[in-house]
Image (cartoon, grey):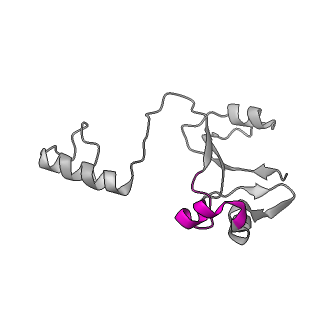
């Protein structure tokens, strides 16, 4: 088994100590909002034994490790990412819809004539 190092997202809303504590490292004073483990293009994990090698490049070269059904549906990449979140204060809950759900929701709210600046409107673009 190979160890992975994830990618840190230093968003302003992040807690400064909890994720470093969980990882067993010293806090650096920066907000550690999210710790990503996966193959996302904006923050792929790298292997501890080969820091220049990303999980994304490894899976792309070894698609059999992902499984035939997943490769058929999503290509030679992981269709998910694990995020460890640590907020310094309350955050709103975010849910990402599918494209079809977004198109349907936008059309429905437009037919209902909900203004784009109304806080009750979920589909704004």
> Residue 19 at x, y = what percent?
70, 36
Give whichever of 95, 65 is nearer the camera. 65
| Residue 23 in sight here | yes
Give whichever of 95, 119 is nearer the camera. 95
Where on the picture, by quarter, is residue 121?
Answer: top left
Examine the rendered structure and indicate whether residue 84 appears above or below residue 104: above
Q: Is residue 52 left or right of residue 98?
A: right
| Residue 41 in sight here | no
Q: Residue furthest front?
A: 69
> Residue 69 at x, y = what percent?
59, 61
**Which residue sits at x=42%, y=47%?**
96
Residue numbers of the magenta segment: 64-80
Image quadrant occupied by the C terminus: bottom left
**Which residue sits at x=69%, y=31%?**
18
Tell me how many marks there are.
Answer: 0
> Residue 32 at x, y = what percent?
64, 40
Give whichever of 44, 10 is nearer the camera. 44
**Which residue sits at x=84%, y=54%?**
48
Residue 35 magenta-drawn? no
Residue 76 magenta-drawn? yes
**Which residue sits at x=73%, y=68%?**
62
Q: Residue furthest bottom?
A: 61
Q: Residue furthest top?
A: 90
> Residue 100 at x, y = what percent?
33, 56
Q: Is residue 65 left or right of residue 72?
A: right
Examine the rendered structure and indicate whether residue 96 appears above or below residue 54: above
Give whichever of 28, 35 is nearer the camera. 35
């Amino acid at each position: 088994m190979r160890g992975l190092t994830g990618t840190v997202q230093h968003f302003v809303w992040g807690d400064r100590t909890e994720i470093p504590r969980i990882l067993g490292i010293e806090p650096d004073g920066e907000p550690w909002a999210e710790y990503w483990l996966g193959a996302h293009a904006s923050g792929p994990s790298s292997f501890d034994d080969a820091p220049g090698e990303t999980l994304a490049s490894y899976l792309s070269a070894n698609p059999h490790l992902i499984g035939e059904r997943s490769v058929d549906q999503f290509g030679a990449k992981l269709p998910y990412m694990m995020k460890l979140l640590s907020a310094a204060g309350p955050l709103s809950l975010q849910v990402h819809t599918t494209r079809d759900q977004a198109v349907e929701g936008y059309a429905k709210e437009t037919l209902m004539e909900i203004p784009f600046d109304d806080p009750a409107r979920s589909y704004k673009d």
